Image (spheres, rainbow, N blue to C red):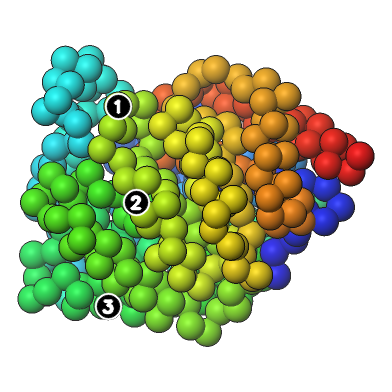
Amino acid sequence: MMRSSSDGILTTHTGSLPRPAGAALPGTEEAAGGPADPQVVRDAVHQIVQRQVDAGIDVVNDGEMSKPSYSTYVTSRLTGFEDHVTETREMPSAREFPEYFARLAGTLAKSMTNPVCVGPVAYRDHDAVQTDITNLKDAATAAGAGEAFMTAASPGVIAQFMNNRYYPTHEEYINVLAEAMREEYEAIAAAGLVLQLDCPDLASWPVYEARGMSKAEFLAMVSQHVDAINTATASIPAESMRLHVCWGNYEGPHNHDIPLAEILDRVLAARPSALLFEAANPRHEHEWAVFKDVELPDDKILVPGVIDTTTNYIEHPELVAERLERLARIVGQERVLAGTDCGFATFAHALPVDPRIVWAKLAAMAEGAGIATERLAS
């Protein structure tokens, strides 16, 4: 079961962290596309967990050291995907602001190229997740971490990044992905780790708008993806899971983003108890106020992002405290954890925030959580 913030606001983050300098880890330039040395991965996990504890993070993870990205890692664990067959899609808002996206292309390409599904999907690498589990648990014990979580791609985000060319319908594709990923989800929870499902697909309206989908069709798809999550996690206690939703982890216009209020009822229908969502960047920071009007279900916990993961500003601890206090005064301190808008290394090779600044931002978050705790107790 997840810890609550009853004795003080706990700190966590969304998942990916900068890889240690010079380490040949999946997705990094040092790896040059080759297989990662298991010992290099293990050492990196121990180092990254210790750094989280040193920065004041209460609920830690492995920083996704074994994964080239939070979503495409599944192609090495599932059958049915072809690495050499690719599809390209345009980033949202690129047509409206072509000059900006052209400048951004050095770190965030206008289009992303991903594998696609070309055959039957099934879980095939039964050892990878167990290795990840062992590495994280050993590192958490060595560092004296209070709690640990592990991320896993949701059926919907897999479908979003890796388009279907095999199954007759999107519904069938989603259901097959849910069944295939069930093994990974259950293994993480059975090991005593908190399972985090990464679900940016639940807020990715601009991506589907560009594909010609109506908003009504998109919202119906969101419900379909939530149903798939609930089916795949049916045997896992809700209080052992958390769900992350975001609007795309890149510095850009975001002027087509769907408001949180329009998807919140569907997102809260997902089984995981904790909801991680963006609440620090300028496009979505105001949306904390939606919880003034929405009655949060008794079994839900909120993990707002209180630091931005796309800029090199180091948030002032007082600002972090303010962001936490205003939400805690609505839903209760025990139902709020401090988090980040998204990951700091969503793709291992792309680091929008300087690694040293990442750790300074996390330390500022921890300091701000302490300030908020003191104020809420007074």
Query: Disc 2 and disc 3: Cα gap in Å?
Result: 19 Å
Amino acid tagged 2: Ala
Q: Position of residue 237 (x, y in %)?
A: 60, 78
Query: Could you say where residue 261 lies in the image, as x and y percent from the top left?
Result: 42, 52
Nearest to the observer: residue 235 or residue 257: 257
Element class at badge 2? helix
Number of other residues with Cα within 10 Å of mark 1, as a class: few under 14, some 14 to 19, many 20 or more: some
Looking at the image, residue 378 sits to the left or right of residue 256; the answer is right
Is residue 197 among the parts visible in the rendering?
Answer: no
Q: Identity of the amino acid at label 1?
A: Pro
- The residue labelled by disc 3 is 175
Q: Which amino acid does label 3 sit on?
A: Asn
Q: Distance between the residues labelled 1 and 3?
A: 33 Å
> Residue drawn at (45%, 27%), measured in percent from left and top?
282
User: Residue at (19%, 36%) from the top-left corner?
Assistant: 91
Residue at the (35%, 40%) spot, across then down: 248
Which residue in the structure is indicated by mark 2? Answer: 203
Q: Residue 253 carries which label?
A: 1
How far from the left and from the top, in percent, is residue 95?
A: 11, 28
234 to 109, vertically: above or below: below
SS of the residue at dot 1? loop
Tell me the distance, in whole angstroms, between the alpha carbons under discs 2 and 1.
15 Å
Q: Which residue lies furthest to the right in this view?
A: 378
Q: Quadrant of the C terminus?
A: top right
Q: Is residue 218 above or below residue 344?
A: below
Look at 14% across and 20% down and name the residue there: 98
